[in-house]
Image (tube, coloured by chain):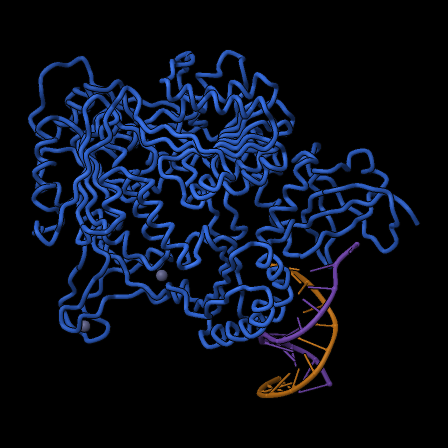
Chain colours: A blue, B orange, C purple
DNA sequence: AGCACGCCGACT
DNA sequence: GTCGGCGTGCTC
């Protein structure tokens, strides 16, 4: 019997695609790229049509129904999905499910017409009595009108003062509809190309030449912080559009702000090009709409975070990966892809230019550029001849702080506040203190589900695990020895904020970390307040280093560089150098030059030294030499296999059995097997974890060995699961 | 991943 | 005798 057969990738962990009969009624619409519902064993599942051909249909089950009326992705992407699935050794159907936006089922176009309260200073002159009220009123008189949520992030716990101001008539209270699409609201100051510096023009000329030449053109744009990479991107996009092709712009999730999007919108406003934003901040309906219009070919420019690398563009001319070193491009669970690496893969398959931009390229990227595999473009100077900030190390063995901040940094903060300029402090620890220690036995309180100490939060008066959702009120006595003295040890952003309030009682201080930016829009409010200069000192975790451009910031302090350098990971130095250079780059982006202080006990570490000298190349040279010695990336390739399960002994036994299976074939292929060893985070969410690391000097043998994984996975005892991470970024 | 089948211990 | 434990294997 012959008929129409669809090859379907089912969204389930199967290691091959399945064939289904296309029933008569669906023949006209069953095309490549369609989502379908298919029978799978005794149940049904979602699948994706990869191909439709005539063939033998004996024993095939029929497709049940088509989901949606048009394809979710163009046929050309099928090969891209297949290659990505093979590279990361992940089931094809799951790859495609990850690639497509959640809620593709459509239909759910609910509009939440929420309102929010807004406040604005009245005409009334004079000043209220309370100092807190004066402060609030000052702020409100300086801005137009402000939403309650935003006000609360700038002035925490200001409700009572605010109420008083409203009652006295100093402040007017109103309501407005909360905006559904945070990106649609921005006013578009019609923007045109800016004159580029000679250096920008040179870089653009190279990109333009590559575009004219056509084909796969990987390029690295290495431009220091504030060197005007975005203008180069914009002009390159114009050039791509002129040739009738489309552009895809990837930015880190945290940088995908209304400001950024409006800058692109403004440039291409007035019907010159249509732009879509793919963003998790959109509602399901909005994301569906955006995706569908891209798939229909109605969009010339797509901007999005990691998952936008799968945008269903059909005439892709260029992919820009901004801040290509950013670790948020790597998906941390499930299909663990790296958007930059997939951008290169896709660019190669679709003959596109791939432009990777960064002030601190990932060493793997830089190394590829040195080898000539990627063209190297450089913007070594800031625009307007602005100087790079002056970076100083504070040797904590000499300048011993009483609290968290050394005297030199305190003095600089006080002076900066007096000048009315903004400061930024980086401390990579959330909460008040990373430990609660027993004064009697010295034991720290630990998470019952994870092998890690609990963090003490003063604001919520509780202990929390930063790795799972465990929380508990601080106990009265030590669980180990019943001692009564439990003391916070070490410092987090909360404590830093407190110390700053004592040092600078008049300053407006705000904190930015995962705990203050959990709510939607909270991060954006902080950024806005910072831009309006409603904040004098912003303290936060690495979030404060990520792509923010505050012209008013002239002082940056790094409170503990050491805990970046001391992570148990071969990439610790690279991450530290990158983070320090990026946060230092937040200083002096406006008219006034910037200064940076880095507190450390390891003042002789080469990563710090290079950061002080703004010497990326020097850092890269030294670190690459170390990597080469050890055979680590980019001189070797890694695959991390993590086994986990509730019973430690079972996991360990499974890990050992797995190594025994792998060792022979690995040896034959010239692959090193390291481990098994407990993961650095040996227990997580109640599961014990063992890892084994596969290391090879070239990729093909690794890929060959990975093809055995499905078999080995099936041989695992039932209670133990394995995740495979190709090109792991961290190995916790 | 589900969801079967299947083969052993302890319950009405 | 059957109810249910979860090991093993398949899904067009
Ligand atoms: Zn104790
Ligand atoms: Zn935990």
Q: Residue A236: horizontal and vertical position, in percent?
A: 49, 22
Residue A278 in view in this figure: no
Q: Nearer the viewer, residue A341 or A36?
A: A341
The quarter of the image that holds ligand 1 is bottom left
What residue lies at 50% left-to-right and 45% top-to-bottom? Answer: A338
Q: Give the residue at x 44% y 16%.
A: A266
**Most foreground residue, A708 or A404:** A708
* Residue A532 at x, y percent in the picture: 24, 24
Q: Report whether A156 appears left or right of A347.
A: left
Number of numbered markers = 0
Residue A22 position in % (x across, y down): 82, 43
- Residue A164 lies, with reference to residue A193, above or below; the image says below
Quarter of the image for residue A419 reads top left
Q: Quadrant of the C terminus of chain A?
A: bottom left
| In-front residue for pair A359/A37 | A359
Question: In the displayed structure, would residue A261 be above or below residue A677?
Answer: above
Is A193 drawn above or below residue A454 in the view shown? above
Position of A118 compared to A40: left or right?
left
Q: Which residue is located at x 64 percent, y 25 percent? A: A297
Q: Residue at x 39, y 67 (%)?
A: A682
Q: Is residue A617 visible?
A: yes
Image location (x, y in percent) of residue A95: 60, 47
């Amino acid at each position: 019997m012959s008929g129409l057969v669809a090859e379907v990738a089912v969204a389930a962990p199967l290691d091959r695609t399945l064939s289904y009969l296309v029933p008569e009624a669906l023949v006209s619409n069953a095309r490549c790229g369609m989502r379908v519902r298919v029978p799978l064993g005794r149940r049904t599942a979602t699948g994706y049509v990869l191909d439709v051909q005539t063939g033998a249909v004996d024993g095939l089950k029929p497709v049940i129904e088509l989901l949606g009326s048009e394809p979710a992705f163009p046929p050309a992407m099928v090969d891209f999905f297949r290659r990505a699935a093979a590279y990361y050794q992940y089931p094809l159907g799951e790859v495609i499910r990850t690639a497509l936006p959640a809620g593709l089922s459509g239909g759910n176009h609910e509009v939440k017409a929420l309102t929010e309260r807004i406040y604005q200073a009245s005409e009334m002159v004079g000043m209220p009595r309370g100092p807190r009220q004066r402060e609030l009123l000052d702020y409100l008189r300086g801005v137009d009108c402000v939403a309650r949520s935003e006000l609360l992030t700038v002035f925490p716990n200001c409700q009572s003062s605010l109420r008083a101001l409203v009652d006295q008539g100093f402040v007017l209270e109103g309501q407005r509809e909360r905006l559904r699409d945070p990106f649609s609201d921005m006013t578009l100051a019609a923007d045109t190309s800016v004159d580029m510096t000679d250096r920008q023009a040179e870089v653009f000329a190279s990109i333009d030449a590559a575009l004219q030449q056509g084909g796969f053109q990987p390029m690295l744009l290495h431009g220091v912080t504030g060197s005007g990479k975005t203008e180069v991107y914009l002009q390159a996009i114009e050039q791509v559009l002129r040739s009738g092709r489309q552009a895809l712009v990837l930015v880190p999730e945290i940088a995908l702000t209304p400001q950024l999007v409006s800058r692109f919108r403004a440039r291409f406003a007035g019907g010159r090009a249509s732009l879509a934003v793919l963003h998790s901040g959109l509602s399901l309906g909005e994301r569906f709409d955006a995706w569908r219009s891209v798939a229909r070919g109605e969009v010339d420019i797509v901007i999005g975070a990691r998952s936008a690398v799968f945008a269903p563009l059909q005439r892709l001319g260029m992919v820009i990966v901004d801040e290509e070193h950013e670790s948020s491009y790597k998906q941390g669970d499930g299909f663990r892809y790296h958007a930059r690496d997939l951008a290169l893969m896709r660019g190669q398959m679709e003959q596109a230019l791939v432009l990777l931009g960064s002030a601190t390229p990932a060493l793997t990227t830089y190394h590829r550029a040195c080898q000539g595999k990627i063209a190297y473009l450089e913007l070594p100077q800031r625009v307007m001849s602005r100087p790079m900030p002056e970076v100083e190390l504070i040797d904590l063995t000499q300048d011993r702080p009483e609290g968290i901040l050394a005297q030199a940094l305190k003095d600089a903060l006080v002076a900066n506040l007096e000048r009315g300029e903004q400061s930024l402090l980086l401390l990579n620890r959330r909460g008040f203190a990373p430990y609660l220690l027993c004064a009697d036995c010295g034991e720290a309180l630990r998470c019952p589900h994870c092998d890690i100490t609990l963090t003490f939060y003063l604001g919520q008066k509780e202990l929390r695990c930063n790795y799972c959702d465990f929380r508990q009120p601080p106990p009265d006595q030590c669980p180990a020895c019943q001692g009564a003295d439990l003391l916070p040890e070490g410092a987090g952003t909360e404590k830093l904020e407190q110390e700053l309030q004592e040092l600078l009682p008049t300053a407006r201080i705000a904190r930015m970390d995962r705990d203050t930016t959990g709510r939607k829009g909270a991060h954006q409010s902080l950024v806005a307040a910072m831009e309006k200069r409603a904040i004098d000192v912003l303290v936060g975790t690495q979030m404060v280093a990520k792509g923010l451009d505050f012209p008013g910031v002239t002082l940056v302090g790094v409170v503990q560089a050491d805990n970046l350098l001391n992570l148990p990971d071969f990439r610790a130095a690279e991450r530290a150098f990158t983070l320090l250079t990026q946060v230092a780059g937040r200083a002096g982006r406006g008219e006034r030059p910037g200064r940076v202080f880095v507190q450390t006990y390891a003042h002789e570490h080469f990563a710090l030294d290079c950061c002080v000298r703004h010497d990326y190349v020097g850092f890269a040279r030294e670190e690459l030499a170390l990597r080469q010695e050890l055979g680590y990336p980019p001189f070797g390739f890694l695959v991390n296999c993590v086994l986990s399960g509730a019973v430690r002994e079972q996991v360990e036994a499974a890990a050992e059995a797995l190594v025994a299976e792998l060792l022979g074939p690995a040896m034959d292929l010239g692959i090193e097997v390291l481990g098994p060893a407990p993961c650095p985070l040996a227990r997580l969410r109640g599961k014990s974890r063992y890892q084994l690391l596969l290391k090879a000097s070239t990729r093909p043998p690794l890929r060959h060995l990975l093809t055995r994984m499905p078999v080995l996975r099936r041989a695992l005892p039932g209670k133990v699961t394995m995740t495979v991470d190709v090109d792991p970024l961290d190995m916790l």
